[in-house]
């Protein structure tokens, strides 16, 4: 605190709600004065109209901070809250000697005369307001002036730890050569015969590919086998839906003879 600190002194705090959004500032302001060693009493929130105060605001801000809600009922225009704050402060000044300090929290600069009066009565006066509306000729009237921007809770910045991407070795694609197609021909023929013996007329290429990879240890798992590979070894490929490659299938009755001729060739 500038000037001198009132250890366990009482400070009266007046919030002008008429032209200042202070929902997020009520608690920081009260806590600041408590931390500085003040007894914060009274704590008054001045409003021009009861419609300014919603139930959620009461529950989250007014009640937890033990604020007295003061409503200006006189229809004197937009400065009604200002006039009521003047009255509340002067009433306390003249009827109690217990408050050595006063604080005015407002978004305008209409309290110059009140500040001068309080200081003339040897009261320590603190002002709180926004920088853009608080000119030096006004702020200099106070014993101390605090800018609202300096009281707003600073956002908590959480630094994300970016883990380095794991470098994985890409499996080198093996070239499908003559040896591959010979092995594919041999293995597929064995599967083909089993399917015929089971009296199946159709078999999906995907099922044959699965059987190849399951029955040939690791060899065929190194390759990406498609229906085109079956065409290269002489099989006729059909599609349940030509727009969907995964519906490729073989009709055993169409391929048996061709298969045997190709195989024995």
Image (spheres, grey):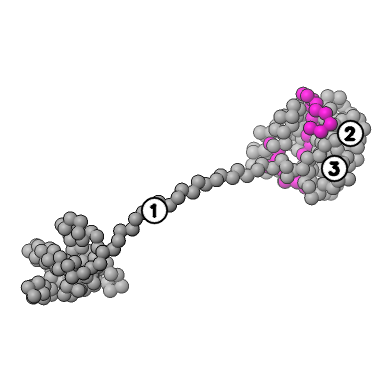
Helix, strand or loop at mark 2: helix
For the point 36% across and 54% down, the residue is 168
Cα separation between marks 2 and 1: 71 Å
Mark 3 or mark 1, which is nearer the start of the sequence?
3
**Mark 1 highlights which residue?**
167
Location of residue 127 in the rendering, given as x and y in whole percent from the top left corner: 81, 39
Mark 1 Cα within 10 Å, few/some/many (few <14, many 20+)?
Answer: few
- On the rendered image, what quadrant is the C terminus found in? bottom left
Cα separation between marks 2 and 3: 15 Å
For the point 86% across and 46% down, the residue is 136
Foreground pick, 214 / 85:
214
Between disc 1 and disc 3, the foreground one is 1
Foreground pick, 257 / 23:
257
* 88 in the magenta segment: no
Helix, strand or loop at mark 1: loop
Q: Which residues are magenta?
A: 1-27
Residue 96 visible in the shown view: yes
Mark 3 Cα within 10 Å, few/some/many (few <14, many 20+)?
Answer: many
Location of residue 218 in the rendering, given as x and y in whole percent from the top left corner: 20, 56
Location of residue 30 in the rendering, given as x and y in whole percent from the top left corner: 72, 34
**Mark 2 highlights which residue?**
118
For the point 68% across and 36% down, the residue is 27
Foreground pick, 255 / 179:
179
Location of residue 48 in the rendering, given as x and y in whole percent from the top left corner: 78, 44
Q: Which quadrant of the figure has residue 148?
A: top right
Residues at circles 2 and 1 in contact by the CB criterion of under 8 Å:
no
């Amino acid at each position: 605190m500038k000037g001198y600190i009132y250890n366990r002194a009482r400070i009266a705090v007046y919030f002008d709600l008429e032209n200042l959004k202070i929902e997020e500032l009520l608690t920081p302001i009260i806590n600041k004065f408590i931390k500085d060693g003040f007894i914060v009493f009274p704590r008054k929130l001045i409003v021009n109209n009861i419609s300014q105060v919603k139930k959620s605001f009461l529950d989250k801000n007014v009640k937890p901070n033990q604020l007295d809600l003061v409503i200006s009922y006189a229809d004197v225009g937009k400065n009604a809250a200002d006039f009521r704050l003047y009255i509340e402060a002067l009433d306390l000044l003249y009827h109690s000697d217990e408050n050595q300090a006063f604080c005015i929290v407002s978004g305008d600069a209409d309290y110059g005369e009140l500040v001068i009066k309080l200081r003339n009565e040897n009261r320590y006066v603190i002002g709180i307001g926004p920088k853009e509306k608080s000119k030096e000729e006004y702020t200099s009237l106070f014993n101390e002036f605090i800018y609202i921007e300096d009281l707003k809770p600073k956002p908590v910045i959480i630094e994300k730890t970016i883990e380095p991407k794991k470098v994985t070795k890409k499996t080198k694609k093996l070239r499908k050569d003559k040896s591959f197609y010979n092995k594919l021909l041999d293995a597929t023929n064995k599967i083909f015969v089993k399917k015929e013996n089971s009296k199946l007329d159709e078999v999906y290429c995907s099922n044959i590919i699965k059987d190849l990879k399951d029955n040939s240890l690791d060899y065929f798992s190194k390759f990406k086998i498609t229906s085109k590979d079956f065409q290269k070894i002489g099989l006729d490929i059909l599609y349940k839906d030509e727009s969907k490659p995964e519906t490729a299938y073989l009709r055993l009755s169409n391929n048996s003879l061709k298969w045997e001729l190709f195989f024995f060739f």
